[in-house]
Image (cartoon, coloured by chain):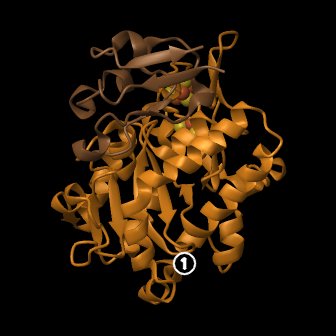
């Protein structure tokens, strides 16, 4: 089953970036908190049932923190 | 009438009943403590959503069961209903205190700290520590007069934001929200259909075909995909099974072709919430 992995060591400043959040058409990814301390690398694929596997999040991530596992 | 009207409406719409906003209910149900826990631990709810979502994805046989349990949990604690602009304004007129607060959902879905789309009503969150550990909530509070609140509601309506009311320990109503796809309830119920967190409104919209010129402006504002277009007769139609009765489409129609009707008048909509 399709899965999305986000490497917390690479996604270090999620709140200043949000590129994956903007790119996801299906609303799969969420930030979980508006606070950097909490949100740091904590972008999470929450609603995976909506994920189409388009790979847009992986493509836009400047830190290459997102991997799609098929 | 929705389940909440039947249980808490005293023959009226449940949100027309002053008791459901009262200080007595607030202290009786210990709403203050509930709100504190709720705001502080909101992000932990995600684990529940992830489990629910996983069960749905796997087409697990327990999904139906978990969905029901989760919905009944929400009904008891934090449930919503869509209301049209005029009902939101009526509620504002009943309130002694209205405080504009940053939207919790947009904080969690998009990391926005100051998306001030929500109103705390009845309870003034400033003097207490309801808002807990979230300094951005405390810092960005603004007390509104009734007129200011109504003006904002009308502005949101024109932008196509849907109004809704929310309970904190049902039936205590503590807030009015103005939502789009970044609302968690919308995301869970409308986008992903994981479970029910809010009821549709007590209304359903209808287009007067004699007035409609088929410009499709209304279609653009409907966040529920309820408006359909026919190129054969150049008219728009509202699918009553999909319509949430938010009434937002009306503001787009300069032919004034759209009206909101009582949902209860259509027998087959009686169970569609
Ligand atoms: S906005 Fe009014 S006139 Fe235009 S399509 Fe909708 S109902 Fe018809
Ligand atoms: S058609 Fe129904 S759900 Fe859509 S905007 Fe109009 S009232 Fe709201």
Return the x and y of residue B253 as percentages of the image width and height.
47, 31
From what the image shows, is residue B62 above or below residue B254? below
B263 on left or right of B74: right
Q: Nearer the viewer, residue B201 or B169?
A: B169
Chain drawn in brown: A
Foreground of the two, B123 or B221: B123
**Label 1's element?**
loop
| On screen, residue B254 above or below B44 | above
Percent position of residue B154, x then y: 34, 48
Name the residue: 63% across, 44% down. Answer: B51
- Colour orange belongs to chain: B
The residue sitting at 32% across, 72% down in the picture is: B130
Task: Give the quarter of the figure containing the N terminus of chain B.
Answer: bottom right
Percent of width and height locating residue B109: 39, 39
Is residue B104 visible in the rendered structure shown here? yes
The residue under label 1 is B17
Residue B118 at x, y = what percent? Answer: 34, 55
Q: Residue A12: name its quadrant.
A: top left
């Amino acid at each position: 089953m399709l899965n999305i992995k986000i490497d917390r060591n690479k996604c270090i400043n999620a709140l200043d970036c949000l590129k994956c959040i903007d790119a996801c058409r299906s609303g799969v990814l969420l930030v979980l908190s508006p606070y950097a301390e909490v949100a740091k690398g904590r972008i999470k694929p929450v609603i995976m049932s909506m994920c189409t596997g388009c790979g847009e999040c992986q493509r836009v991530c400047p830190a290459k923190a997102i991997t799609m596992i098929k | 009438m929705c389940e909440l009207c039947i249980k808490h409406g005293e023959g009226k719409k449940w949100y027309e009943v002053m008791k459901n906003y009262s200080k007595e209910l607030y202290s009786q149900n210990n709403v203050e403590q509930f709100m504190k826990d709720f705001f502080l631990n909101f992000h932990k709810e995600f684990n529940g959503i992830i489990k629910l979502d996983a069960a749905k994805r796997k087409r697990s046989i327990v999904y139906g069961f978990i969905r029901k349990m989760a919905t009944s949990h929400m009904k008891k604690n934090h449930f919503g209903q869509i209301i049209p602009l005029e009902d939101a304004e009526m509620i504002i007129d009943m309130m002694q205190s209205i405080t504009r607060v940053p939207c919790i959902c947009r904080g969690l879905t998009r990391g926005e700290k100051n998306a001030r789309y929500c109103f705390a009503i009845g309870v003034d969150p400033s003097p207490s520590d309801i808002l807990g550990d979230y300094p951005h909530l405390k810092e960005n509070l603004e007390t509104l007069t009734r007129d200011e609140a109504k003006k904002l509601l009308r502005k949101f309506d024109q932008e196509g934001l849907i109004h809704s009311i929310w309970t904190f320990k049902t039936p205590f109503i503590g807030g009015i929200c103005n939502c789009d796809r970044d609302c968690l309830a919308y995301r869970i119920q409308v986008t992903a259909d994981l479970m029910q967190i809010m009821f549709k409104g007590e209304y359903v919209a209808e287009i007067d075909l004699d007035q409609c010129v088929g410009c499709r402006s209304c279609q653009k504002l409907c966040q529920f995909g309820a408006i359909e277009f026919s190129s054969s007769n150049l008219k728009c139609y509202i699918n009553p099974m999909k319509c949430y009765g938010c009434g937002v489409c009306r503001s787009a129609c300069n032919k004034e072709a759209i009206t909101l009707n009582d949902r209860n008048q259509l027998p087959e909509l009686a169970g569609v919430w």
